[in-house]
Image (spheres, helix red, strand yellow):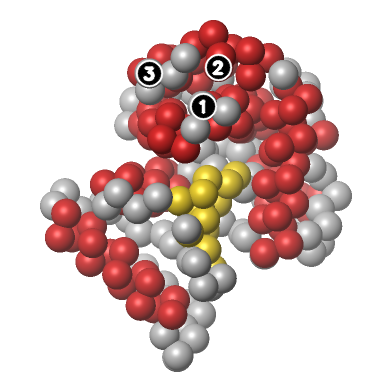
Amino acid sequence: MITVYYDYLCPYAWRGVELLAALEIPFNAKHYSLVQGNHPSNTSLPRSAPMWKLVDQEIGGTGNAELPAYLDVNGSLEAFFASHAAMQQGQEAHLRFTLELFRARHANKKDLNAQTALAAAELAGLDMNAFATARADEAKCRAELAIDLEEAGKLGVFGTPTIQLETGDIAYFRFDKLPENQEGKLEIWNIFKQTLLSDARIGTIKRAKP
């Protein structure tokens, strides 16, 4: 099964998850923090050894003091903790939650906070008592998030979505528009896989912008 690293802050990650869901491609969900990856304290440091770590921050703390508003420490923690709580109800339930939270943030322009995460859990049809219990165990959510971020760092993840195929090949996969029809969605996915698996070992394709 493929593995996908994503951050709820990222619209490209949203499109990537929507693509996989539409094509019914199962994946292991992992988290990567754009806040941690772009924090000035981590500039020039190996991604596997950051100085500033998201899991060391507290919700409602002063972690955003050195960051632009869009790199939201509180929102990231709320989203990641809720995501780990939703994982306790299985892969299908977690995917439904992930899609609802992404849509709330990027389609409906909601802030990432506890209320938005709770609404996403309800729309996803989760067992709300179980979700509340799992979310209340913040120490477990924090520990699980730390494992995700450590794994991402060791792999050199730098953006989202980053997708690791069953072969171990791994790459950042950004596209600007999700096709409406299934044929277009399948074409995007096949292009990504073929590029990643090609013997040419293509490292970068990036459109020029005038």
Kindly state the secondary structure of the residue where label 1 is placed: loop
Q: Which residue was labeled with disc 2? A: 131
Foreground mark, 3 or 1, reads 1
Is residue 58 among the parts visible in the rendering? yes
* Kind of residue sitting beneath label 3: Gly
Q: For the view shown, which residue lies furthest in the top direction?
A: 129
Kindly state the secondary structure of the residue where label 3 is placed: loop
Q: Nearer the viewer, residue 196 or 37?
A: 196
Residue 139: x and y in percent read 78, 25
* Kind of residue sitting beneath label 2: Phe
Marks 2/1 in contact by CB < 8 Å: the verdict is yes
Q: For the view shown, which residue lies furthest in the bottom direction?
A: 200
**Dot placed on the residue nearer the N-terminal end, 3 or 1:** 1
For the point 74% across and 28% down, the residue is 140
Foreground mark, 2 or 1, reads 1
Q: Which residue was labeled with disc 1? A: 89
Label 1: few (<14), some (14–19) or many (≥20) C-alpha neighbours in 10 Å: some
Tell me, for residue 125, which label it has, or none: 3
On-image quarter of the C terminus: bottom left
For the point 27% across and 52% down, the residue is 23
> Separation of disc 2 and disc 1 at Cα?
8 Å
